[in-house]
Image: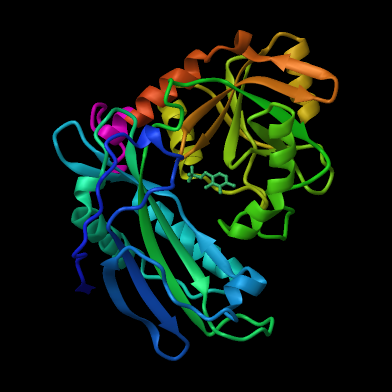
Amino acid sequence: MKISKTTTAKEKPADPAKYPWGSVFSDHMFIIDYKDGQGWHDPRIVPYGPISISPAAKCFHYGQELFEGMKAYNTADGGVAMFRPIENMKRINNSCVRMCMPQINEEEMVSAIAELVRLDKSWIPTATGTSLYIRPFMIATEAAVAAHPSHEYMFIVIMSPVAAYYPNGLAPVRIYVEHKDVRAVRGGTGEAKCGGNYAASMRAQAEAEKKGYAQVLWLDGVEQKYIEEVGAMNVWFVIDGKAITPALNGSILPGITRKSVAQVLKDWNIHVEERKISIEEVAAAYKAGKLQEVFGTGTAAVISPVGELKYDELVMNINDGKIGSISQRLYDEITGIQSGKVADRHGWVYRV
Ligand SMILES: *Cc1c(COP(=O)(O)O)cnc(C)c1O
């Protein structure tokens, strides 16, 4: 791999909490090109900056694009780690299949990202809860306004030092149950991590924010009855001591945090159910006083407790708007494993 170091290192912001999440980038980025017949070639680390592609590049017109989200952390013993990075690479390859894009070599790309992280190690912030957010993405770059899979692609990795998602601690958020727009449908691209799913979600998100809610709760795209995700996170309900999350059905993104949470709950002998769960079931549990906790899971926030769910006229006040004990325990356990304060009993921590 060719490495061209920057000659004009940027000033590192002292406190990532002082600027909008994900808006400042480190000194370098990784790029590799693809062309049919030639395969992936020319891997390189170059100074972070604009890239030049044709305005006819297919990613602009047909949305042939996918991405990932992962983090590098400073660990308690002075090292640097990533959390289950091979899972992100596997998910890229699953997204590639759905989006007709060329698969990557999972191990080689983890190594390339590790190389990039080592080079920009000084960009990893040090305060508790902070990290270097890593954004790999793939775009179709062939110049042709013709709706066929591109013959050329770029895979790029950029990195942004970020604060804890909730700088004031785990603050429960208000959620609006959306039943006009849907995020994804079975058979569509819901289980691929692609920009198109986000484009489809922005209107409902913007309208919920106008009404004073942080995110929307997505219902399924066919019957608008079963719960799928919360915002851009997987969602969990604690009902009568059992932890329930919607089963992966093709329109739900298979989160790595979701998978890790399921494992940790099982380690703790908390009963886990992955199955269909309807909004009516949640409302009935609430009315019966059995809805104990609701939380979202994803790399950015790790655990995001829900304090209120607004479903038509019903306002469900969850755990008096306070963080539930399971939510708090999960947050402490997973961030503890990531930072090396809790034993890595499942081999999830990848030393950079
Ligand atoms: C990325 C993402 C998630 C969470 O996945 P993690 O691997 O846990 O970060 C959940 N839902 C959507 C729609 C996503 O894009």
Q: Position of residue 89 (x, y in %)?
A: 41, 59
Identified at 59% across, 42% down, the residue is 232
Quadrant (top left, top right, bottom left, bottom right) of the N terminus? bottom left
Query: Is residue 335 placed above or below 109 in the rendered structure?
Result: above
Identified at 27% across, 64% down, the residue is 112
Q: Quadrant of residue 95?
A: bottom right
Left or right of 335: which side holds 240? Answer: right
> Residue 345, can we see it?
no
Query: Is residue 44 placed above or below 232 in the rendered structure?
Result: below
- Relative depth, front residue between 227 and 208: 208
Left or right of 323: which side holds 217? Answer: right
Q: Position of residue 323 (x, y in %)?
A: 52, 15
Query: Is residue 148 placed above or below 176 in the rendered structure?
Result: below
Residue at the extreme left: 78
- Relative depth, front residue between 264 and 74: 74
Q: Is residue 59 magenta?
A: no
Q: Position of residue 155 (x, y in %)?
A: 42, 70
Give the magenta range: 336-352
Q: Is residue 339 magenta?
A: yes
Q: Position of residue 351 (x, y in %)?
A: 21, 47
